[in-house]
Amino acid sequence: MQPPSWRYVGTSESTRLDALTHPLPITELADAIRCELKLNCFHRESRQDDATFKRAVFCGSVSHDIFDWFFNARTGYRGAFFESPDNGDRVNRWLLDQLTAFLSDWVIAQELDTDSPWVLASLAKPSAKVWLAESPGLCDQCTGEWNPSYISELQIQNTRWELPSHVHSVWGRQAPRLSKIRIFGGFIDSQQNEWLASHKTERAKQIWKHGWS
């Protein structure tokens, strides 16, 4: 049974609710994503106000069940941040480390980029992260399924995310049933110096507090 600090309220199929309330351990999550992830696209995204900084961005799809485990389960990605900001950062880095070789190999195999060391360097930066694919995306193939008006039929109650009225909590308490995952490297320049937007410096704390950043 799920601990009382993490439960689901709202409308859901019984099979989905059963899977969410009896998830596999997080130690198996990376393998599950890597085995099922169907990559759709890769981009070198430029920093908006300084194109000398770019980051590697991937988008791919998994089944609704794997997405639920990743994004909505107590033993998933956001569940790790719910434990603590530091734990969330550790799981984020672990998941990236488990996926990096797969992502880099795919870029080379698809002839989308020839600079594998640059891809690896971007994915290795502390600001690299995994998240759901938000709208609009960088191309038609990675157009996000989630947007600020999205409302899920199922929501998470964990005595934290459902309490504030902050818009991040309004989004964070939801359990969206989607399929697209986006993986971001860090913005780096030609010397591999990293740039991080000021509003993302407390990302881990924001997810811990609201379930969203």
Image (cartoon, rainbow, N blue to C red):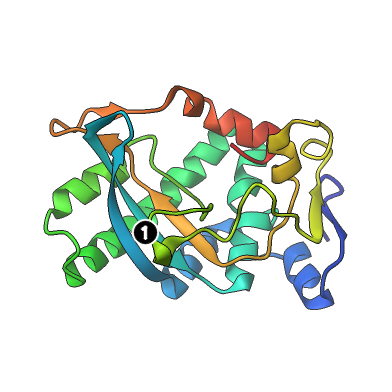
Label 1: state its secondary structure. helix
- Residue 186 visible in the picture: yes
Q: Position of residue 197 (x, y in %)?
A: 41, 27
Q: Amino acid at mark 1?
A: Leu
Q: Where on the picture, by quarter, is residue 209?
A: top right
As drawn, 21 above or below 90: below
Q: Where on the picture, by quarter, is residue 9?
A: bottom right
Q: Residue at x 56, y 67 (%)?
A: 179
Q: Callout 1 environment at 10 Å: few (<14), some (14 to 19), or many (20+)? A: some
As drawn, 126 above or below 130: above
Q: Residue at x 66, y 39 (%)?
A: 83
Q: Position of residue 139 (x, y in %)?
A: 38, 60
Q: Can you name the residue that lies furthest to the top here?
A: 198
Which of 44/204 is in front? 44
Which of 138/27 is in front? 138
Q: For the N terminus, which image quadrant? A: bottom right
Residue that carries the numbered disc 1 in the rendered image? 99
Number of numbered discs visible in the structure rendering: 1
- Residue 84 visible in the picture: no
Q: For the C terminus, which image quadrant? A: top right
Q: Residue at x 53, y 26 (%)?
A: 202
Q: Position of residue 204 (x, y in %)?
A: 55, 33
196 lies left or right of 166 = left
Q: Position of residue 111 (x, y in %)?
A: 16, 68
